[in-house]
Image (spheres, rainbow, N blue to C red):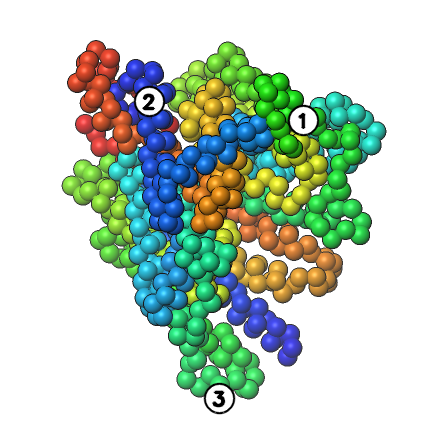
Amino acid sequence: MDFFIAIVQILDSTIRLSVPLLLACLAGLYSERAGVFDIGLEGKMLVGAFAGAAAASVLHSALLGLGTAILISVAFAMVHGFASITHRGNQIVSGVAINFIAAGSTIMLGQHWFQQGGRTPALAPGERFEAITWPGADALRDVPIIGPIYSELISGHSILVYFAFLMVPFAWWVLYRTRFGLRLRAVGENPAAVDTAGISVAWLRYRALICTGILTGVAGAYLSMVQNGGFVKDMTAGKGYIALAALIFAKWKPVNAMFACLLFGFLDALSIRLQGTPLPVIGKVPVQFMQALPYVLTVILLAGFIGKAIPPRAGGVPYVKER
Amino acid sequence: MSTPYAKLPAWADYGLIPVINLFVAFVVAGFVVVLVGENPFRAAVILVQGAFGKGTGIAFTLFYATTFIFSGLSVAVAAHCGLFNIGGEGQGYIAGLGIGVVCLAFDSVLPWWLTFPLAIVAAAAMGALWALIPAYLQARRGSHIVITTIMFNFIAASVMVYALVGFLKPLGSMAPQTRTFLDGAQLPKLNWVIELFGAKIRSAPLNVCFLLALLMAFLVWLLIWRTRLGYEMRTYGHSAKAARYAGISETRIVIIAMMISGALAGMMALNPTMGDQHNVALDFVSGAGFVGIAVALMGRLHPVGIVLAAILFGMLYQGGAELAFEMPAISRDMIVIIQGLVILFAGALEHMFRPYIQALFASISPKTVGIEAVKGKGA
């Protein structure tokens, strides 16, 4: 039974750890499917986290915090769009620039506004998203098997967790069942054809980036307003890049993205859980190995040893209208 | 790739446009300074004075510049071959492993001028090795070099943490770093050169790595513009199809270019470890690999431009430290913002002002502006 409880706990923290990855990964999905590479997921999450926590603590409202996070994150996405769509700059360079600006400005402004070494003030209970306890979760807690699964795994998360997982079928529906999604995928594969059909390539790509900005904003808000009660400098700590890795791992598909993020979240949860405890057969696994595993897996996948990941064909190429 | 932009006279292309881009980046940075309630003009004066006002400041500026020359050259070599090596950070970090092993093994036996070449070889080899795998995967398995090099940055970080808390750390020590190197692995300072000009230097870490960096800048120039290999690399960078048609082996050229790039990134680790701290510590690269991207873009991928841009960034680092000291509202993170803005305006938005400048040139004298768009100038 202890073993079972341990598994439920690991799975529970898997969910918590994979939510920011999942949101960022779906964010990347929209922009990359539209043909815009986005290395700046990391930076956009960071500004989202900062703006969310800062606004929530000043305005004393979690919802206003979330709104601000989304707003600022979308603004950064628009900078990326301005550079890489309107001015046809190098998308990767632009993404790198956004990560730098985000890393520097969150600390500078945080220090200036709150004087706590780049942190935002600790959020009070009403200023962050609380866990939602589902009906009957407490009553069922002691029931074997189902009890822990229902009360730990399914119930007891914040609204953003459920939002993240709802976004998976939503993204699938948008991409594969709507006109916007069809065009979005087309613009990532063959923008010239979309242009010929009389649809604006630039506007489509901008809209895709708005979706990206919204989702990275929520991802950031989750980090600073759910997982942590406030903003800490560099709190994304490479999650944007892991999300990018997950996106490739998922071969740019929404449902796969969820499983990839859960896998990477699981590895993370496992490495925290196993810290220092020796495993049977293998012995003690270094923490660093577990931390590096998502990256190693992505490299192996990219090398084509676990199926082939084929990116959207027009990805990374600025569209130049024929003249 | 063709660009829809017509050609400008060379001095405008390589001088005017970067200066305008840089100027805009600094104007935006000035707004950030205003936002935190300080005077941007005073900040600029403090920055420049801190970097060049005193002998110590100059020495520190050149010390920082040394690292950035290496990382800038690394990005540039790959970029000439059409590859974006974003993994300089990891290649430099992992080179610390080679340097650490060489220095710990030889610093008690050999003098510095024998340890140094060994460490250069070790650093370059580790950096090149770390670039080899992404290069191979790009050339043979078609995986995107940007993604793999990013992944390798993280893997390098994990490997280095593992090494530094494990076998590189002296027994019984808690700090994740090697022991302090003995005299045999401490590089001589170059401060006397600046003192020749009459400036006084208290202690500054400027060391012989600076000369190595200048030598590498010259060698990169020689490689890119004066050798057959460099020609092949540039051909491949301009058009992979043309290169294939000309019988240039794709695999070979990608792997060689990336390994040179990785070796240069690896050498950047010499400066902070053997030249300054005299140990290999956790996270000693601290973002210098990424600064290389800004430096290379700013310097227009030319070694001379890179050396100048590296000095500019060295100035930002040194002057930024002074600025953080003088103006409490501004921290060293201001430099990170400026870097980001420079990358944005000099890199991603480099064409933003071009049409206006072209219009201006055309209105002054139409002859200076070519009519048709030049093929193959795209980044």
| Chain under callout 1 | B
| Chain under callout 3 | A
Numbered mark located on residue A139 in the image: 3
Instruction: Find residue A181 and report its horizontal and vertical position in percent.
Output: 27, 52
For disc 1, the marked residue is B189
* Quadrant (top left/top right/bottom left/bottom right) for the C terminus of chain B: top left
| Chain under callout 2 | B
- Residue at position x 17%, y 41% from top? A197
**Is A196 positioned to the left or the right of A270 in the image?**
left
For disc 2, the marked residue is B16
* Residue in the foreground of this view, choosing between A66 and B157: A66
- Residue at position x 38%, y 50% from top? B36
CA gap, disc 1 and disc 3: 72 Å
* Residue in the foreground of this view, choosing between B41 and B125: B41
* Residue in the foreground of this view, choosing between A198 and A90: A90
Nearer-N-terminus badge (1/2): 2
CA gap, disc 2 and disc 3: 73 Å
Q: Are marks 1 and 3 in contact (CB under 8 Å)?
A: no
Q: Secondary structure at mark 1?
A: loop
Q: Say whether mark 2 and mark 1 are on the same chain.
A: yes
Q: Amino acid at mark 3?
A: Ala
**Is B362 positioned to the left or the right of B130 in the image?**
left
